[in-house]
Structures are given as structure tokens and as C-alpha cells.
Amino acid sequence: MKENILIIDDDSAIRDGCSQVLQKSGYDVVESATGKEGLEKIDRYEFDLVLVDLKLPDVNGLDLIRQTRERDLSVPIVVITGYGTIQNAVEAMRLGANDFLPKPFEPDELRMVVQRNLTAHRLAMENLYLREELKKKEGEKKIIGKSPQMEALFRQVNTIATTDSTVLITGESGTGKGLLARYIHDQSTRKDFPFVSVDCSTLVPTLFESELFGHVKGAFTGAESNKIGKFELASGGTLFLDEIGNVNLELQAKLLKAVEEKEISRVGSHRVTRVDVRIIAATNKDLRKEVEKGAFREDLFFRLNVLALRTPPLRERQGDIPELVRYFLDVFGKKYKRAGLAVTPALLAIFEEYSWPGNVRELENIIERLVIFSRDRIIGVDDLSLAGVRIGERIEKNIESRIDASQVRDDSTPLSLSEMEKIHILSVLEQTGGNRSEAARLLGIDRKTLRQKLKRWGVQ
């Protein structure tokens, strides 16, 4: 998108000359002959830079700068001034102007000043975005999975990533919808521009508009300064609307207008701002059913559901569990300074049996707790209770059903998970003729861990 520049100057020759130079440089230019007209345009439209003459017929140039700054905290203001009013230019900069251009000036001088201030403005916007991103950067995760379900999903993503079409991602909580949205952005032509995420489930309705569209000073109680919304912050990049199904009908109407027209207005302002963003939305709800119930607008659903993706639950891709376990052990091993962690085959078997109602997020949380509470480098079944992890009686029953009758106690009392691990380890030890090094190798644990377990069970 071209950058918009407003020129406020009562001298038509200055306006025309500046317009020609800037338009040839690729900018869109709007002209105003008076301060009042200039303020009206600032109220109605968004500008990337304002050129202001200090001597105007109807408004004091310093007052005009002050009023412009009250309307927009971030827009660069460049003062056009004669040599006799340099002192006024200094005062203008104290009031919020960013730069000044003494008359007379050459076309190259104008281009240089404009480019310098626009570049500084872009960098300031990027820094604002980066400050938010840095808060999320620690512990940043990636999508893990080589199962047929995930490979099919990646094929879909790689097909649509380079388009600018809106994407709707559906899936249960904890399946990685946010990670998939980020992956789409990183594979797209917008990858060098911001990826801005909004969690719609955590925003109260009264602040939702402000968060998305921004607000002007005094728009509501507590609005002590202008604020840039997520739509503007994501300009050129991707705006991710997570849990979109939680937005109420009134706000859905306003969101629909922004998505359709690519225009927003800050809360408390009638000024229209063009935005260039790709929308990716996500939800754990069935939006078609929500539309049937009247809880979600049909027109917004169709606008969002241009390209549809579904993240599979972990129970549908259990072949990815070993890789996910290794990944999270590495992540939390580094976080808590515990290198070389692994899990026993018995514990991995339990993980592969579990239905994971909380999906990948639940697995991640359990691995983190095990890393914190486990005593050995090799994490086993015993560490589940130590970490306060209970992952369901169903696993025990499923595993118990496969235990040979000779391995069940005479009183038919069900075996605990730790007892089953003991049976498995002793069986492997028997197969190796008591060779503990070979048994440890087959079990995927080190000799020290095996020795500690045997000592705990009173096996010499």
C-alpha cells in the first residue's frame, strides 16, 4: 500500500510543488489550504505523515501541531518554516513535531526529510510489535508430527500459505491451532511483516473494540492517550483471531465490517484507516452449529471460512507421541537445566494408551511436571505419582488386560502401574541372564537407573 501524506499550506505553489515531487516518489498526497480543513481530513482519514506550514490564515501553526498530536500520537509531523521562524520551529518540535524543513528547499531535501521520518515511523511501529512478540518468545514452540494425519495437514497448509485468503482453523483445545496459524504466516509472502495474535476468549466486550481497532484519547474512562489497535499493528502481515467463536453478536458485526472492507476506525474517532492484513481465525466450536443456534453470524462465518483447516486431536495421531515426548523433554530439560532426559518404554507405553482429552497441551504440561519432580535422568512410571500425575484408570485396565495370567496376583487384585513396570523390568533381566548392562540397553535406561530401581525393590 502507498503511504499517505497530508500537506497543510496556504501557498498553492508550495502545495503543488510538494505534491508533484512526492507523487513521483510513489506517495499518495492530500492537500489542504487551511488548518481547519487539514484537521477535518485528519479526523476522517489516516495519514502516514503530515507536512504543516506554521503560518496559516485561520489557525496558529503551533496550535495546529498540538491538535494534530492530540488526534494521533504516532503520525510524523514535519514543519515547513521560513528562516525567520526557526525559533518557532523549535517550539513546534517541543509540542510534538518530529522535524522541520526550512524554506526555500530543493526537491531532494523534501524527499530526504519525508523518507527519513517515514522510516523512523515504520521502525517505531515494528519496535512496538517486537516488544509484544518478545513477551511470547520465551519457550516458543513448533509443530511436531510425522503421522499421516499431520502430513496431510501440512500438504494443505503448503498449498494455501502463499495465498492471501482468509483461513479458519478448527480443532479441540490444545491441538496447536495457534502454532498452525504461525506456521502459515511463516510460509507466506507476509512472513517479513508482523504476526499479531488476539485471544478473543480473554477479552471483555468493553475492551474488545479498543484492542482490535485502537482508541483515541478520551474515548472512554481510562483512555489517557491514543492507542494503536491490533489491526494497525499487523499492517502488511497476519492477524490471528484465536477462539473467534467467543465473540458476541454485536462485536461480530463490527468485526465483519473490518474484515470485508479492510477499514477500521479507532474507538472515539470517525477517521477511517485502511488496513492490509491477512485474517486467520481459530475456534474449538462448531461454527456451523453456532450459526444454526443464532449465536454466530452466518455472513461472518462465510467470510472467515474461505479456507478451512482442522487440527487433529492427539488421540488420532498417537504415532506422534514419542517424538512429542522427546521434544518436550528437550524443551523443559533446557529450561530447568536437566540435560539428557528420557522416559522408560513402560512410561511411553502408558502415554500411547492414554486418550489425551487435553491433547498436546496436556502432554506438554505432564512432561514439564515430570521434569521438575523426577529424581533420575530416566523418567519412569514411579515418577507419575511423584509428580502428582494421574492419567486415568482406563490406561491401567487396558494394559492389565494384556498381562499374562501368570503375572497377575493370586487374589486377582489389579496390578498398579509401578508393579507392571517392575514385572516388565524383571522379565527383561531374566531374558538377559541377569546381565544388567544388556538389560538396561534393552530397556532404554542407563545402568545407574536400573540399579536404583532394583535396590528399591530389594533385588540384589
Image (cartoon, rainbow, N blue to C red):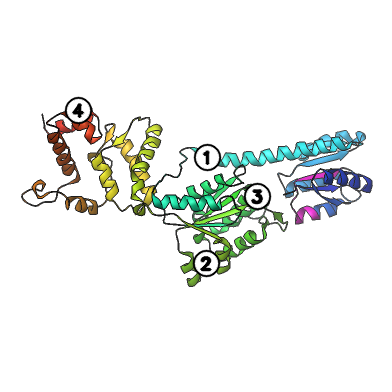
Q: Which residues are magenta?
A: 40-53
Sequence-wise, the earlier of marks 1 and 3 is 1
| Front: mark 2 or 4 | 4
- The percent coordinates of residue 363 (x first, y second) are 35, 46
Label 2 or label 4, whichever comes before in sequence order: 2
Mark 1 element type: helix
Asked if the residue under mark 2 is in contact with the one under mark 3, i.e. CB atoms within 8 Å, the reply is no
In the rendered structure, which amino acid carries the disc numbered 4? Ser
- Which residue bears the numbered disc 4? 437
- The secondary structure type at the circle numbered 3 is helix
The answer to whether the residue labelled 4 contacts the one labelled 1, judged by CB atoms less than 8 Å apart, is no
**In this orientation, which residue lies closer to the viewer: 92 or 381?**
381
Mark 3 / mark 4, whichever is N-terminal:
3
Q: Is label 2 in a helix, a strand or a loop?
A: loop
Q: Quadrant of residue 259?
A: bottom right
Look at label 3 and name its amino acid: Glu
Three-letter residue code for mark 2: Phe
Q: Residue at x 63, y 54 (%)?
A: 213
Determine which quarter of the picture holds residue 343: top left
Q: Is residue 119 magenta?
A: no
**Residue assigned mark 3:** 232
Residue 21 placed where, x, y %? Answer: 86, 43
Whichever of labels 3 and 2 marks the residue nearer the N terminus, that label is 3
Residue matched to label 2 = 296
| Magenta span contains residue 50 | yes
Q: From mark 3 to mark 2, how far is it between C-alphas?
A: 25 Å
State the residue at coordinates (72%, 38%): 119
